[in-house]
Amino acid sequence: MKEKIIHSLTNSNDATQTELRTLLFFTVVISLLLSLSQLIDDSVINSDGIFYLYLASLIQQGGWQAATEAYNWLFYPYIISLVSTLTSLTLESSAHVLNALFTATTCAAFILLIKEFGGKQKVHLYCASLIILCYPNLNEYRNLIIRDHGYWAFYLLSCYFFIKAYKKPTLKTVISLALFTSIAALFRIEGVIFIITLPLLLLLRHISLVQKPNSLTILILAATLLSVFAYSSTYQPLNVSGFTKFNQLQQALTSAITSISSALSSTQTFINTLSPQGFSNDYAPALLIFFFILVLLTEIVSATSPLYALALTSIFFLKRTVLNRQLIWPWIYLIAINIIILCGFLTSTYFLAGRYPIPLALILIIPLPFLVQLAYQQLQKKAFSTTQTYIAKITLVFFIVLTFDGLISTGVSKDYLKDAGRWIAANKDKNALLFTNNQFVSFYAGAHNGKRINEPSFNTVIREINNGKLNQFDILAVQISRKNTDGASSLLTSLAIEPVKAFKNRKGDSVFIFKP
């Protein structure tokens, strides 16, 4: 009798379509507000952002050939230039608007994905909204101009339609899957892997089913795969320069093999250096594999958020699965594909940027709303022991702290760089030549046509001043790190003039502006 009552309550707590749409609307609005708050908190452009805006400016001015020579993946700069042209916003503002919309789409897609994994109850969907909006790693990147925002949005939409097609393939879901994986691939090369693997997995699944599969669906899946392979084999005549570069996959594989061989040789040399007689070169592969796995796990846990990762470990101690049993395998498929992609990156460079594992993390955290709902039920039933209740409260406190930590910047302010650049832009003559050792000052000063510059070291700047190599410049803007305690005195001694303006942050980093 008790089970029937609980089942009845569970059904009554299922979210209606209206409630789902309302939740999605408020999630999108909150996400947009969070993006705005992050931008207000730290509005200084990132290094990659300077590069993308430079490409966008070339495209906007009709310099497509110059843009393709500078970079070979131009869809993101292209849509920035398109938004700027259509709205009359600056390129920088257009990029931030796009990124805010992409991140909001990522949040909405995550909720829809949870629903497809069986999270039909309101508590599942509310928890999904809370988890993705508070996801520290996503929030830390909100104000950065990077193409990953677009990739994450369309990647999650691809995963959503993949799960829908896995459960029940229809013409609409298969076409949507092909569409969104294709758009994701326009942002990052990894999307090409999903163009190939996701339809292939669906095709294999439906061929293996006992019941007769929908012939039209199978035909579309086969056609999708055929078109991908046909395109990849004939990409040279069909390739649109700057949009698709399938040969990068081949280059990545070749680079990975070369990198592994080089790393193995270096490891053997290192072992011999440590102990020429005590160790065997046979240990080199094992040592390399251990290092590889350690880096991979560290980056995955970091991208997932240590708290989220710790919460996920509770899955192994539960007597029942929190996910729909039917959907455990597609969840594992998505995890496996992402791990393979990360391994490809890691074998090529033995380095992973912090944002690279985020697509994997977005899949790994899918069980979290179900775990939260389960914990909430246990608390309501008072089924937790005193220790378990205490752990739950501590976890909640950490969740709140980490959420605010992800939303509030505690790093060193770079506003002084922006202020210095804008002051130069407002106070220099049109044809004045500017020298600076900081790319952000150069960008906001409007120098070098917005191109990202190489930053010479402070010692190089002093040496060039002493050698008279900077005499042709009308303005010098030299950035000095707070760690360089003698930097200001060395600069003033070398130039023998006083700065016309100086900008500093609270930590002591500074920019001195001179007009020789």
Image (tube, rainbow, N blue to C red):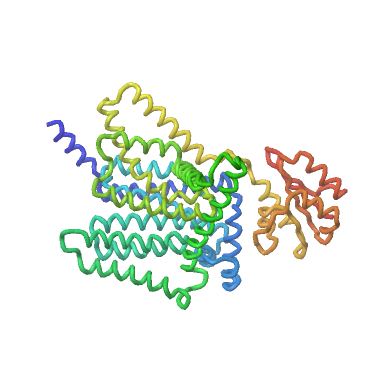
Q: Quadrant of the N terminus?
A: top left
* Residue ranking furthest to the left: 1
Is 389 located above or below residue 467 in the figure? Answer: above
Residue 227's quadrant in the figure? bottom left
The spot of residue 395 in percent (x, y) is: 41, 31
* Residue ranking furthest to the top: 386
Residue 52's quadrant in the figure? bottom right
The spot of residue 333 in percent (x, y) is: 33, 52
* Residue ranking furthest to the bottom: 237
Q: Is residue 14 left or right of residue 416?
A: left
Is 513 located above or below residue 321 in the figure? Answer: below
How many marks can you see?
A: 0
* Residue ranking furthest to the front: 277
The spot of residue 93 in percent (x, y) is: 55, 57
Would you say residue 136 is visible in this rendering? no
Residue 197's quadrant in the figure? bottom left
Residue shown at 50%/58% (left/top)? 256
Would you say residue 221 is visible in this rendering? yes
Residue shown at 84%/46% (left/top)? 492
The spot of residue 121 in percent (x, y) is: 26, 42
Q: Is residue 22 left or right of residue 139?
A: left
Q: Nearer the viewer, residue 432 or 281?
A: 281
Is 284 located above or below residue 307 in the figure? Answer: below
Residue shown at 26%/26% (left/top)? 383
Q: Quadrant of the C terminus?
A: bottom right
Residue shown at 50%/40% (left/top)? 406
